[in-house]
Image: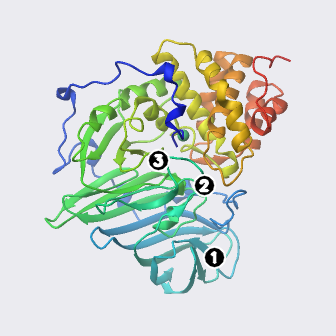
Amino acid sequence: MRRALAGLVVAALVLGGCTDDDPGDQPRADPSSPSGPTLAPSTAADEPPGADLDLALSEPVEDALYPQVGDPGVDALHYDLTLDWEPTAELLTASEVLTFRATGTAERFQLDLGEPLAVSDVTLDGEPVEVEHRGKDLVVLAPVEEDGRYELALSYAGTPVPAAAPTTRSDFSTTGWTITDDGETWTMQEPFGAYTWYAVNDQPSDKALYDVTISVPSPWTGVANGELLDRVDDGDRTTTRWHLAEPAASYLVTVATGDFTMTEDESASGVPITYWTPADQPDFVTALQETPAGLAWLEERLGAYPFDTLGVVVVDSESGMETQTMITLGDTEYATSPEVLVHEMAHHWYGDQVTPRDWRDVWMNEGMAMYLQGAWQAEAEDLEVADVMDYWATFEDEYRAESGPPGDFDPAAFGESNIYYGPALMWQELRERIGDEAFWSLVRAWPAARDNANADRVDYLAWIEERTGEELTDFFDAWLLGETTPSRDTVVE
Ligand SMILES: [Zn+2]
């Protein structure tokens, strides 16, 4: 997620000369008949789920901060969602097939699904089963056996209602399925809120694969994570099919519906990129065309982009989210700025490829994304990264005092600035302690070491200690759990 407040922008580091206002440089945009590499037929989605589902095996946990969402008894492997959106009536009509592994033998199991959605036709492996839908808890009254794999199918319909976000941030107060005045929709759902529009194990330790089909009135388009397999306009409605080939946590899932223009681009490394911008706001394409340059900068430091495709969808929001392979950005100048693009792309290594097991450790995402953003900003302005960190240090103590230590924050204050700046400063201190070469080697190796998996603080910090041969427990405890900012530049023992 991007940082909370416009006031956090480093005023002295405002970038100049980075945008290209010449529309003649834009890649072709052809919303009516997309073609090209991003639409090449894929055999993966046509295969029955099964063969590749092991990629999505997880060890789900109960969240330390938000135990009311998620059920560690369920290990979701694949969500197949078919969504039909009727903007005038604000009606979502959907069907879902969830393939999952039961982590234990139980008489029943539970998913999260918004209360306003009425559930019908529930079957488990083809047999009708009863459910109890109380609040957002969808309890399926059917026994499951440890390590058994099951296919739960259900239909649901209604007008989704966003969830209250456990935060005091200024750029968002609710999460999940959000409906604009025009009936367009978008989702941002960190730390939870996917359940406002599908039945889900809504906790980050349970990554899963996705296929999403979206039907909307033409000329609107439904956008989701992954590769666009096809887009069919029957003159009345447009249906898109999306396939996400690597597992994602539910907070990294995105769906947006509206009148979008698709523009194709490509990174220097050959990653196909699509921009989905509001048809009545074409200027956003120019801003998004900074994506390949930002990605090249990150790939130089972090290695190859860890997914097959990349996209950006611009929606009626003020925030931004690193939704996996399809970044969701608000339609503001700041949310579509080069530094925010770098930040959200950095999350594709730190957050998407390796994901916190529990929300206690969201600093693992934001600290490194912020550090990389700061390093990018420094380079763009011909400054030392230490200068940027010195500036950030002038307000870090205040954020820490307000919202708690980055690794032990108040659950009602999710995503505040304390999880961004303190951990970014910590990485700079580690860099100065172990040297540039060792530092960048660590930064590059960690996401690949936990590819498509989850990690927690104990796992991460033990890995760093092993790689560096340094005893760092006190150092990390001070930065992550300390009530006050540790003194800087006094790290050499
Ligand atoms: Zn972020």
Q: Looking at the image, which residue is at 50% across and 86% down?
A: 127
Q: Amino acid at mark 2?
A: Pro
State left or right for residue 340 relative to residue 215: right
Q: Amino acid at mark 3?
A: Gln
In terms of secondary structure, where does tag 1 sit?
A: strand
The image quadrant of residue 166 is bottom right
Q: Looking at the image, which residue is at 35% across and 68% down?
A: 83
- The residue pinned by badge 2 equals 204
Label whose residue precedes the other's in the sequence (1 or 2): 1
Disc 2 crowd, CA 10 A, few/some/many (<14, 14-19, 20+)? many
Q: Which mark is residue 109?
A: 1
Name the one closer to the observer, 2 or 454: 2
State left or right for residue 247 relative to residue 434: left
Q: Amino acid at mark 1?
A: Phe
**Gap between marks 1 and 2, in whole Å?**
18 Å
Q: Going by the picture, which residue comes out furthest to the left?
A: 235
The image quadrant of residue 310 is top left
- The residue pinned by badge 3 equals 324
**Gap between marks 1 and 3, in whole Å?**
27 Å
State left or right for residue 349 relative to residue 97: right
Q: Is residue 6 visible?
A: yes
Q: Position of residue 17 (x, y in %)?
A: 34, 18
